[in-house]
Image (cartoon, rainbow, N blue to C red):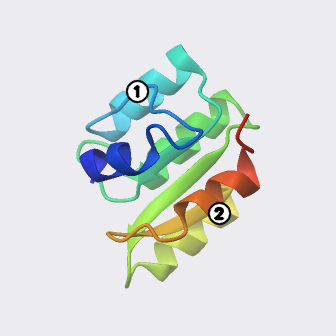
Amino acid sequence: MRTILRKIINGKDYFILSEASNGFEAVEQYVFFRPDVVIMDITMPNMNGIEALKSILENDSKANVIMCSALGQEYLINEALELGAKGFIVKPNFDDIFDTLQSIVPSR
């Protein structure tokens, strides 16, 4: 999914600053890079996206995190939004990714 997102996003007014293969890396990289927005899968090894979201928001309550999920995980999406995620996108087609990004972090 990261490869697909990179191909979709890079060069379209946004760029990928960093990638993480699990929730622990996502939190570490957020703290190090402080990106404008994070697109994070709910399902990840070692620390799932919900736990990583909590950790990122504990570190920075204004973090812009967009959760990524497959259909059928509505309860997890709702939990993420209640915790403070700014939006969500449904994988694997990512049809609304630029609308979601634009609503959270306008292109420059």
Residue lying at 45% horizontally and 46% vertically, measured from the top left: 9
Residue type at numbered disc 2 = Asp
Front position among marks 1 and 2 = 2
Residue type at numbered disc 1 = Ser
Residue lying at 58% horizontally and 58% vertically, measured from the top left: 98
Give the quarter of the figure containing the N terminus: bottom left
Which quadrant of the structure image shows residue 87?
bottom right
Relative vertical location of residue 79 with respect to residue 65 in this rendering, above or below: below
As rendered, which of 55 and 103 lies closer to the eye?
A: 103
Residue lying at 47% horizontally and 71% vertically, measured from the top left: 95
**Reading the chain from its start, which is encountered first: label 1 or label 2?**
1
Q: Where is residue 22 in the image (x, y as percent from the top left)?
A: 29, 39
User: Residue 94 bears which disc, if any?
Assistant: none
Q: Position of residue 6 (x, y in %)?
A: 35, 42
Give the quarter of the figure containing the C terminus: top right
Q: Where is residue 49 in the image (x, y as percent from the top left)?
A: 42, 51
Q: Residue extending furthest front?
A: 11
* Label 1 element class: loop
Determine the CA span between mark 1 and mark 2.
Answer: 21 Å
Q: Where is residue 91 in the image (x, y as percent from the top left)?
A: 36, 69
Residue identified by numbered label 2: 99
* Label 2 element class: helix
Q: Residue extending furthest bottom?
A: 72
Residue identified by numbered label 1: 18
As rendered, which of 7 and 58 lies closer to the eye?
A: 7
Relative vertical location of residue 81 with respect to residue 7 in this rendering, above or below: below
Residue lying at 47% horizontally and 54% vertically, measured from the top left: 50
